[in-house]
Amino acid sequence: MRGSTRQRGLWLGAVITATLVLLAGCTSGVDSFDVVTSRGRSVSDLFLWTIIIAAIIFVGIAIAVAYILIRYHDRPGAPAPRPNRHVHRFQIAWISAMVVLFAIFAGFMFHSMNIIGAPAAPSALRVTVIGHQWWWEYQYPDLHVTTANELHVPAGRPLQLTFQTSDVIHSFWVPQFGWKMDALPQRSNEMAFTIDKPGYYQGTCTEFCGAQHAWMRLRVYADTPDQFDAWVKQHQQPAAPPQSELARSGEQVFLANTCISCHTVAGTSANANIGPNLTHFASRETIGTGIVTNNPTNLTQWIRDAGSIKPHVLMPGFPTLSDDQLKALVAWLEGLK
């Protein structure tokens, strides 16, 4: 009876474990195997072949162990097993096969490393990616554009991303690009690739960088050439002038407070670079690196007390602003497109 109960418990544990493993593979639209860069596919292919061959070896060993347990398990009255004179040959053959297999995989690994480490094409679009606690800054030195948190690039054109950090180590990982790259203090790393097709690609920082590491999200938009050219033209312009009396009041609230000590808004006297560039803030879909949607309600709460939305965020709250000042400031920021 006890054995039967124990067996049922083992089966239940196996079912629960298998279910958890399957659920761990569930995603919200991010497919690590749907790689959209040719260099990243070399990494993905290497991983898949490693898993396939490892699975074949595992199944082979499991079958061999099961056969041995069934065929040679101890039976009452059975004679003692005789030594197998071929066991040493089998061990040598097995070890030799593993050495050869590892050598083959090492060759494929170095080949993949050479592919992803190759320099970018001369025509590549250069983007400097700077990690901050806890947001991303994107500088396009050839286009004279600086933005934050939402990376726009043209699909089909070679890219060269240079990674830096303003504080601690960060890591840029978009699963569908195929591999990740670290941003290290006092050092620049480069990542060259071409996105094959237009689309929206999600990612995140994968190097623990502090309390809000989990909310250092990545949003990459691979635009068509025409869409990207329009985006660049828009972001090369200074901030849009206020279109209403309320928005004009909001601009004065911004310039009269400590906002100008951290942020840049091109076309105004605000030119600090501690926080994100806000010149075209309203064109972004989220606030706080993806934590909430960019709309007046969330923006109002963010300005009033950013820590209530994103604890430990470095942006201070502004509890002393009156409701009218806050409403005006939000109206101005929502017009920066």
Image (cartoon, helix red, strand yellow):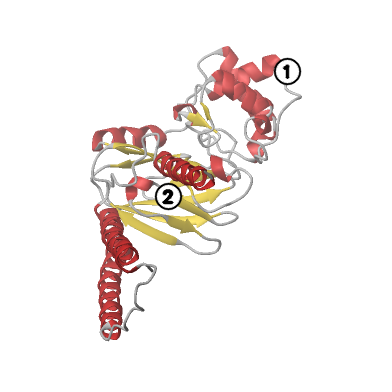
Q: Nearer the viewer, residue 226 or 286?
A: 286
Q: Quadrant of the C terminus?
A: top left
Mark 1 Cα-neighbour bin, 10 Å: few <14, some 14–19, many ≥20: few
Q: Quadrant of residue 77?
A: bottom left
Q: Which residue is mark 2?
A: 173
**Residue 94 in picture, x, y percent from top left:** 28, 77
Cα distance in 3D space between marks 2 and 1:
41 Å
Mark 2 or 1, closer to the camera? 2
The residue pinned by badge 1 equals 322
Is residue 122 something one can see in this rendering?
Answer: no
The residue type indicated by label 1 comes to Ser
Mark 2: give few (<14), some (14-19) or many (20+) Cα within 10 Å: many
Please tell me whether residue 206 is drawn above or below residue 71 in the rendered image: above
Q: Amino acid at mark 2?
A: Trp
Residue visible at 42% across and 33% down in the picture: 237
Q: Compare residues 167 and 336 and report the one nearer the observer.
A: 167
Relative placement, left or right, of 55 versus 269 is: left
Q: Horizontal and vertical percent for residue 49?
A: 25, 59
Residue 60 coordinates in the image, percent (x, y) = 27, 63
The correct choice, above or below, for 278 with respect to 329 in the image is: below
Q: Residue at x 53, y 42 (%)?
A: 216
